[in-house]
Amino acid sequence: MVFRRSVPALLIVSLTCSVAGATMAVAPGAMAAYVATSSLAAFTLVAPTSEVPSGLLARAVIAAGAGCPVLQGSTEAGTDFTLPMNLRPKPALAGAAYAAVEVCERGIPAGASTAMVGSRVIPASLPSRIDRIALTGDSGCQVNSSVVQDCSNLSSWPLARISRNIAKNAPDVIINLGDYLYRESVCPPNDQNLCASSPPPPGNLPVSGSAASWIADALTPMQPAFDAAPILMVRGNHESCARGGIGFFLFFSPQRSTALQCAPSIVGGVVVVPSNDITPTWHVTWQVGTSDADSHSLTLEVVDSAYGQDGSVGAFAAAQRTSYVAAENHVAKSQPDEAWLLTHRPIFGMLPTQFFPNGGSVWSSADQAAASQGLLGRYGLILSSHLHVAQAVNIPGQPGQIVLGNGATQLYPTTGYPTPTYGPLSQPDGSALSPLATPYPAPTGTWTDVRFGYAIATPGKGSKSWSFEHQDDRGRIFAECAVARRAVNCQ
Ligand SMILES: [Fe+2]
Ligand SMILES: [Fe+2]
């Protein structure tokens, strides 16, 4: 184990500590990982099997120049492996914002029973039959011109606590539904008591995220969850290229081909980043069930909904539709026993009525609802975040929608969620929101709860039924949603 005395500038965030006589400043919580492994973070991503046969990818975030650690472990057959990790490409023009870190990756061998990156143990495998899935979304500490959370207070921003309590549930796998990066402004002068240590956006790029903000907002507070189980990362709109996209594709995207997706370029002498870049739909299939007799296949279709409008239908919906067509085609072809759609922006989600003081449709997100229309018939469930609540919605003839956007970022108002008398893609009077899309019927039921937390999903006895247990940030159960026959009922 080698302790590096040279500390990258980005680590100067809020705390100082002293090791081996050297005093340095580090991000909260980063010290243990840094000293023990020389990795700033290490985790196991769920990846498509087209990327890696095991469906699992080891990642390590290291100080630039430290050199990639090796991935080592052993297989169930008792064979040891030691594999070099490869540097993940980093956009050349990401500049100072990402200069202090590098990312190393390597596919975990199929059949691995243990895995370590440097001296840090990472999850090595998924069970042959999954029966416990943790789900969360919308997690960063919000710092912008209108909302500032207290980033060092676990009651105000409980991501580290949520990560620990997710780990205590010993999930087989974790799904994060997106929106990781929320530190998008310089901490306002009047809010120094809340966010003085929060890394500001980089000044030299047309984006709001940097390596420092990703470390503070995600990599450090999520490490307990990273240690617990492989994690499937969905891209949120906060990971569009103009926001946290460079970091998302560097740290969390599971495909090698996406590493440079948000790479800045120079156009007319100005640095720009891509917009409306949609990553191709990808999927994973797991065996799930409470027993071997109940074991059946569950396919997750992961649709990138980083872009699009929430309250109106525009031309973008036609471009987005190809993502939902790809998902539908794959499910039609592969015929899993069960299929869920994972997409950050909900197809059938409700905003609070307070957001519409002059009336207007509470349904969100309109572009996604239009883009996916007629392509949802094979799903038993839609999972999203984006709205900062826990919510469930049933639209006649459609899969139930669960929203899990209560994962630590600033919550929405606690009241103002009556069941609408009109459906998605409708105005409140029932007329069409847009000539480009057909209104859905009014919901048969909705449920909304506004408190920090996450959910633990377990399959019911017999296939295609599930229980989603909602736990608050302290791990206390506050609701349970039963999923059966494409409907969600919460209480
Ligand atoms: Fe969000
Ligand atoms: Fe979002």
Image: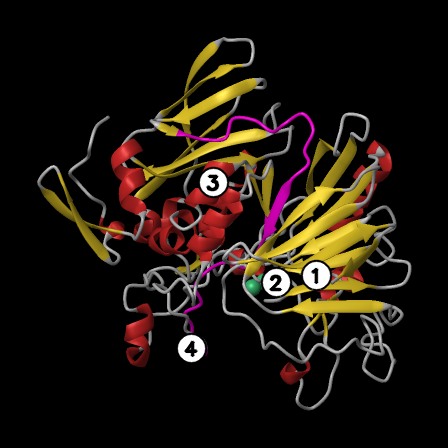
Which mark is in front, 2 or 3? 3
Ligand 2 within 8 Å, label 2 CB: yes
Mark 2 or mark 3, which has the lower sequence index? 3
Q: Is residue 112 above or below residue 460?
A: above
Q: Position of residue 101 (x, y in %)?
A: 33, 42
Q: Amino acid at mark 2?
A: His
Q: Earlier in the sequence, mark 1 or mark 4?
A: 4
For badge 3, the amino acid type reads Phe
Q: Of the residues under marks 2 and 4, which one precedes in the sequence?
A: 4
Dots 2, 1 in contact, CB < 8 A = yes
In percent of width and height, residue 282 lies at 68, 40
Which structural element holds mark 1? loop
Where's the N terminus, which quadrant? top left
Q: Quadrant of the C terminus?
A: bottom right
Rendered image: mark on residue 145: 4
The one nearer the camera, 317 or 113, is: 113
* 47 in the magenta segment: no
Main SS category, magenta section: loop
* Mark 4 crowdedness (10 Å alpha carbons): few <14, some 14-19, many ≥20: few
Which residue range is magenta in the image? Answer: 121-146
Residue at the location (44% across, 49% down)? 247
Of mark 2 and mark 1, the one earlier in the sequence is 1
Specify few, some or many for label 2: CA neighbours under 10 Å numbering under 14, 14-19, or 20 or more. Answer: many
Task: Give the residue number, with chain letter if any, for mark 3.
Answer: 226
Q: Position of residue 296 (x, y in %)?
A: 80, 31
Q: Kindly indicate whether the residue at mark 4 contacts the one at mark 1 (C-beta within 8 angstroms).
A: no
* Residue picked out by circle 1: 346
Question: Which residue in the structure is indicated by mark 2?
Answer: 386
Q: Badge 1, how many Cα within 10 Å: few under 14, some, many 20+?
A: many
